[in-house]
Amino acid sequence: MTKPNAGAFRAPLIAMTSSAVIAACATAPVGLEPVDAVVPPTEVEETTKAPGLSRTGVAPQQASDDYYVAAAADVQSRTAEDFVPRARNVILFVGDGMGVSTITAGRIYAGQQKGLDGESYRLAMESLPYSAFSKTYSHDAQVADSASTATAMMSGIKTLSRTLGLRSGIAYGNCASLSGQSTDSIFEIAEAAGLSTGIVSTARITHATPAATYAESADRNWEDDNQLGGTDCKDIARQLVDWDAGDGFEVVLGGGRGAFFPASLTDPETGEAAGRRTDEADLTEVWTAKSDDHVYITDQAGFEAIDFTGETRVLGLFEPSHMQFELDRAEDPAGEPSLAELTTAAITRLSQNEDGYVLLVEAGRIDHAHHGVNAARALGDTAALDDAVQAALDLTDAEDTLIVVTADHSHTLTLAGYPARGNPILGKVAYGPGGLARADDGKPYTTLGYANGETGCPPGEEDCARADLSDVDTTAKNFQQQALVFQGSETHAGEDVPVYASGPGAELFRGTIEQHEIFHVMGRASGLISYED
């Protein structure tokens, strides 16, 4: 949905006086219930200059939210008295569904793929000097979804699962409940401050995590107008091309072009209906009509034709839906850039702005592979994310760039048995050469498995026997690990997830933190957010 007076808030943001901040922040404070109260002037923070960055920190409109206030205080308690904001650039990497077990298995996988000792191998993300654990629950769920968790990281609050960019007073699926529940994401704040911004994702660019940078939606599934069900809300794809923060995104690279076209048009790659829109709009034309610098691309050739050292603003939508899994990418006839290539391009383009940038990079398909109890593809995409992290480390300066790597939530993947060191992580448990382990049913089993998923015993077959894997190649990319409990789609898991960080402000990540504190560390480190110390 379009934010109330969004343009009026953003345009003068850099030069806001304290009275303007008061007006912008005088929305209903929200804790567990919305409250109709005006924030008194004494409770609104003054804007502060960030030394060395020539930035004016601001208080976003959700600054009175109880979650926001508590998280800001927690981060402040870890901040040294002489702390100075020095992060000219901020890069947030999100491995969707990349919990501890995925990182452990991904580490072993990546090492073994390189012919190295997997157990002692170290991922690039694990080389970052600071780390913490993040609590991922949402306002209403013990185990959260990607929309609420992304909102936490982008806007500094906790909110309802399945909603995007809104405070917890929202009613799921109800457009009429949006009043007073808007937030300002760190991307909107960055744009208003004159920074460049970009989003990269292997998921649909209208999917939960990337959408939280620019959209407000009472239902994360409203990705195009075909999903709105007759409501008056604005769909997420439309919100992207209509986004009026600053001068808009410099780079948007991912999947999901189906949300931008009507069915009456034909997709150039598949030859099928281009999309699902009922308003017959071609939203890519809305993008390219913004200026001569705005371009739209769909494949590897188009990607390689772009000069990312120039002023071009790129909307790249490489698939009708999600992009290819890394293990399948080479088989795409039209070609797709890797996540590392997309990250390199985005950083190159955003670095043209001397004032700095904020970038989101999401490996969105780790989650999708896990939902399909397909560990091979999940680990392949984890390794691809790590390659992107290494690319960012190679391209940036730790003196002025804060890099954060984390997950939005975990999955039910587990590593089990007592496999010998060096045993293939995707293989069957073996104690050594010729020492294949067998469960009490006499059958071999894999190191990796899931607590639930489609390979569990389906309804009506509660006494079904576990499949015999003796003659099955469990390392094949299409192999689905066995699951304990039947679910049509494997679920998220609720344990805390790691946060790895380097650069200015990274030292604020330590211990166990609330997930929405990530926003506050980024805001404090970059000087984009005003805090009363």
Image (spheres, helix red, strand yellow):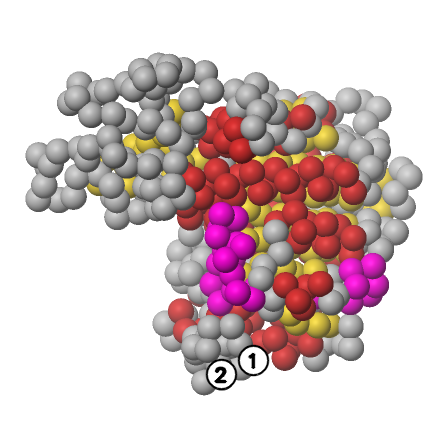
Q: In this view, does 110 lie to the left or right of 49?
A: left
Quadrant containing the C terminus is top right
* Residue 459 locus on image (x, y percent): 13, 44
The stretch drawn in magenta includes residue 315:
yes
Q: Residues within 10 Å of mark 2 (few under 14, many from 20)?
A: some
Residue beneath the point at 41% across and 70% down: 228
Quarter residue 479 falls in: top left
Q: Is residue 284 magenta?
A: no
Residues shaded magenta: 307-334
- Taking the image as shown, residue 337 lies to the left or right of residue 442, namely right
Q: Position of residue 286 (x, y in %)?
A: 64, 78
Question: Is the residue 111 above or below the residue 199 in the image?
Answer: above
> How far is disc 1 from disc 2 in space, using C-alphas?
9 Å
Question: Dot 1, crowdedness within 10 Å: few (<14), some or many (≥20)?
Answer: some
Q: Is residue 324 at least partly visible in the picture?
A: yes
Which quadrant holds the N terminus?
A: bottom right
Closer to the camera in the image, 118 or 247? 118
The secondary structure type at the circle numbered 2 is loop
User: Measuring 40% from the left and 69% from the top, which residue is drawn there?
Assistant: 227
Q: In this view, does 417 lie to the left or right of 242?
A: left
Kind of residue indicated by mark 1:
Asp
Q: In the rendered structure, find residue 265 and report the number of the disc placed on it.
A: 2
Whether residues under marks 1 and 2 lie with C-beta atoms below 8 angstroms apart, the answer is yes
SS under mark 1: loop
Picture residue at 51% right of the left edge, 61% below the top: 332
Let me know if residue 32 appears in the view: no
Nearest the camera: 158 or 53? 53
Label ID, residue 282 = 1
The type of residue carrying mark 2 is Leu
- In percent of width and height, residue 435 lies at 31, 15
